[in-house]
Every structure is written in C-alpha cells, then in structure tokens.
Image: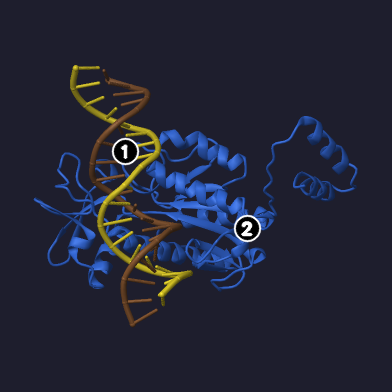
Chain colours: A blue, B yellow, C brown
Amino acid sequence: MKLWNNKTEIQFFIEALKNFASPEQLFYNLQDGYFAYVPKGSNAEGQTLQSRNSLIGQYTEKWSKTIFEPIAKELGLYAVNSVVCEELGLTRQSSADLALCTTDHTNQKPENIKLLFEIKMSVVSNYKFTQPNKVEFIGDYKQHKGNPALLRSDSMLKAIGKSINIRVSGIASTKIPVVVLGNSPITESYIKKVDFLKTSGVIQGFWSLNPNPTNSDYVKNTPKLGFQTILNNKQLLNNSKELVTNDMNYFSSMISKLKLGEIIRISSQETTDIAKAEKFLTLIRN
DNA sequence: TTTACTTGCGAGTCCCTTAC
DNA sequence: GTAAGGGACTCGCAAGTAAA
C-alpha cells in the first residue's frame, strides 16, 4: 500500500460520495463550481465547511490503521483504532486514534500498548468536483486558503496537549512511545519545538506520511528528526521497529543539583548499568 | 505603507453521557 | 425514549506580527 498522495484524497471523496455524502457536505459550493478548499484569490462567499470534518477524520484513522497493519504483523502486534486505557487518560471520548498492541482489543492495559499514535491528517491539496462523480486535482496546499493538518498551529498544540496528557497520567505511560502522524509538513516556527519535544522525551516524533505534499519547498526533516517526512514503507517499518524494540523510559523533573547529585550517587552504587538506571528512575520519581 | 505570514478563537457538526 | 450538556473534531476568520 502506498503512502498518502493525491489519489488517496480523491479516493476519499469518491468513497464518501458513494456512501451518500452530498457534494455540499464535501466541497465548497462556489460560483466557479465545487472545490475542496477555497482557491487563493477566490471568495469563500461566507461559507465555512464543517460537514467534512468527521468524515475525513474517520477516513484518515482507518487509512492509517491499514498502512500500519503489515508493520504491526511484522512486529508481532496488532494495529488498533480508538484504543481506550484508563491508566493513560485515554477514555472513550478521548481515545488513542491508533496504537500498536499485543492484542486486537479496543480496551487495553498499559503493558500491552507498544506504540501510541495521535493522527492529525486532513485533505491537503485542492480538488474540483463536477457532477456526477469527477474529482480532479487542481493545486497543492499552497494554492488554496486552507491550512491542512500539521501546518495549523492549533493542530500542533492539540497534538502536544494530548501527548502531555498521556505523559502526566501516571507512571504506566513512561514506557510507551508517542508519535504524531500527519500528512503535511510543519511550519518553520515549530522546527525547534518538535526537536525539543523529541530530545526531552515527551513525543518520540512527528511523522508526515505524505512524501510529496508539494513540488515547491517545504520542511522535509528537522535537524534532530523530531519531524520527518516518511518516504517509503520501509522507513516507516524501521522507525516503528526502533521505538517498539528499544526498552525506553520517559522521565522528567525539576530539582536542585544537590538533590540530583544525591540521586546519582545512590544509583551509582548499584552493580550493573541496568540496575543503576532502575534505581535512578525510582529515586527521581519520588 | 503594503503585503505576507502566524496565531488563537470560535463556529458547525458529530457523538457520547447523563438526567428525567 | 429523548432532550440537554459537553468534549473533540476541522478549519475560516480576524487580529497581531514580521517582512518587503
């Protein structure tokens, strides 16, 4: 299965139309015809399309599950949508969009969740619809007024907020990597922030599954790979594999050098490196 | 001064929970 | 059963900021 591209988006519209979604639900009904987004220079004529939101949300979550299914299989896991785990603050109303787990159940224990995904994807490029069922590409995201997926600052803030919410929900979350999946680049203003989120351990990465969002310039990768544009399925597998197989631990604190030194001194008395690390993690969390 | 970009807010929609 | 309340979703709008 191919990564996200314009055909994926056209397929979304065709499928939605087949399932009795009306053109008015999916497109802006402008003077020049039906458009996915308002082209730059055109007038929105007072419209703010909202009826597409939940449809594209459902489509991207299912699509992501499908693309991760062979990867999960390779790692001996299942790709599961709408994962609920009370210990991680993932409730039915605010579940994990996608997760790789040891079982295929929606309700999960923390120890069975190996990788959590927060999905922030939308229609990226612009399309024109003509009756009865023709959907044609008319321009990339720079040629319309909308701001897709991770290019919106509030989408970034929501993704970060959701991840922090998991991290502060308890000690059970400290062994589970969290990755934000998008299908657009990010803005320049978030380059430093995503790298810091990665090095500080809060979020293990922002991955765009759209290798060619535009033919012009865009942020492809950040220096420390906090944000990466995934170019093929192999890369996606390798990235996932690394996160699932490395036994990682998240920790954070705000303590004095005196206290930190004490913790290091006590932990260093353990015999093996692993034991030192375990002692350190125990002490820093108390 | 004009233009381009960034940002936070809130609207419309869907869906779940709760109360009666 | 059903109405009310509220959370989460996406994205247009307008105000603020930076660049030309």
Residue A174 location, x and y as percent? 66, 53
Q: Residue at x 84, y 36 (%)?
A: A262
Residue occupied by mark 2: A244
What amino acid is labelled 1 in the image? Ser
Residue occupied by mark 1: A216
Pick the front one: A164 or C7: C7
Quarter of the N terminus of chain A within the rendering: bottom left
Q: Residue at x 49, y 37 (%)?
A: A222
User: Do we see residue A222 in this rendering?
Assistant: yes
Q: CA distance from mark 1 to mark 2?
A: 34 Å
Residue A232 location, x and y as percent? 46, 54
> Image height check: is B12 above or below A156?
below
In the drawing, does residue A162 fall left or right of residue A183? Answer: right
- Name the mark on residue A179: none
In the drawing, does residue A65 fall left or right of residue A196? Answer: left
Pinpoint the chain carrying mark 1: A
Around disc 2, counting alpha carbons within 10 Å, would you say few (fewer than 14), some (14 to 19), or many (20 or more)?
some
Residue A34 location, x and y as percent? 15, 56
> Image height check: is B2 above or below A43?
above
Disc on the earlier residue, 1 or 2: 1
Q: Residue at x 87, y 37 (%)?
A: A265
Q: How many marks?
A: 2
Pinpoint the chain carrying mark 2: A
In the drawing, does residue A17 fall left or right of residue A202? Answer: left
